[in-house]
Image (cartoon, helix red, strand yellow):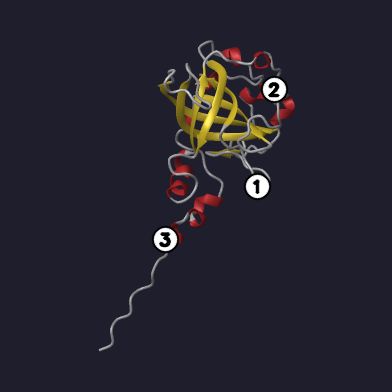
């Protein structure tokens, strides 16, 4: 009697990020969107990761963030200074704007371009480390003009993102998890370090450009 032939071997690559149906499709709104409590305005640099190089675009990330740790003198280092607070959470929606977009990043009418992850253009996107601002407060109070003073309890200050995509990155299991809850964000909030220019930046109505697919 002839031996039975084994069934076909299923390669692990079948389950890779390139095969995941939602990897290339537009991501839907995440369940964390109604719980978002912060907006980040971050600079995309000409040399990825070099925060001293020219700024080629600004990225607005709306996030669900949670405070993690206070940084003492024993723990400071690159991007993390004594007195900082670390925050981690998830990106809920994003938009890519020109450099120096003014106050439009805080506008309630900002046209969002993507849910759950950073916007990429011409094969590149925002990478860590990157620097900018955070507005941590009641997003429901934001108005069309992008007035940061609408919430007296909000924290409007400097922020540095140290990592995107942990714990899994964009491939493998990350390709399954990220479309459901968004890219993970980790960074540091620097209390009371708001640049003077950011305190009075006028709203640039030209910053409304872009697709509203992720509204």
Mark 3, mark 2: which one is toward the viewer?
Answer: 3
Residue 35 at least partly seen: no
Of the numbered discs 2 and 1, the one sitting upstream in the chain is: 2
Give the secondary structure at mark 1.
Answer: loop
Q: Quadrant of the N terminus?
A: bottom left
Above or below, 78 relative to 73:
below
Residue 104 at least partly seen: yes
Query: Percent x, y for residue 44?
Result: 64, 34
Query: Percent x, y for residue 93?
Result: 55, 35
Mark 2, mark 1: which one is toward the viewer?
Answer: 1
Q: In the drawing, does residue 103 fall left or right of residue 116? A: right
Residue at point 58%, 39% (across, down): 114
Find the residue positioned furthest to the left.
Answer: 1
| Mark 3 → mark 2, Cα distance in angstroms | 47 Å
Query: Percent x, y for residue 192?
Result: 55, 13
Q: In which quarter of the image is the C terminus?
A: top right
Q: Nearer the viewer, residue 92 or 68?
A: 68
Residue 102: assigned label = 2
CB atoms of marks 2 and 1 within 8 Å: no
Residue where numbered disc 1 is placed: 123
Residue 91: assigned label = none
Q: In which quarter of the image is residue 207?
A: top right
Label 1 Cα crowd, 10 Å radius (few <14 / some 14-19 / many 20+): few
């Amino acid at each position: 009697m002839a031996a039975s032939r084994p069934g076909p071997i299923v390669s692990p690559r079948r389950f890779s990020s390139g095969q995941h149906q939602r990897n290339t499709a537009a991501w839907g709104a995440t369940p964390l969107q109604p719980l978002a409590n912060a907006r980040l305005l971050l600079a995309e640099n000409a040399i990825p990761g070099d925060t001293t190089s020219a700024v080629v675009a600004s990225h607005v990330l709306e996030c669900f963030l949670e405070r993690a740790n206070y940084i003492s003198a024993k723990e400071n280092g690159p991007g993390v200074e004594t007195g900082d607070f670390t925050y981690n959470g998830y990106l809920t929606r994003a938009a890519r704007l020109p450099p120096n977009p003014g106050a439009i990043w805080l506008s309630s009418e900002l046209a969002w371009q993507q849910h759950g992850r950073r916007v990429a253009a011409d094969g590149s996107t925002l990478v860590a480390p990157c620097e900018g601002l955070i507005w941590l407060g009641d997003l429901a109070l934001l108005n069309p003009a992008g007035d940061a003073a609408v919430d007296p309890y909000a924290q409007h200050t400097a922020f540095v993102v140290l990592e995107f995509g942990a714990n899994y990155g964009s491939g493998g299991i990350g390709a399954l998890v990220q479309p459901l809850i968004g890219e993970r964000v980790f960074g540091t909030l620097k209390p009371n370090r708001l640049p003077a220019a950011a305190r009075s930046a006028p709203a640039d109505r030209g910053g409304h450009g872009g697709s509203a697919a992720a509204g």
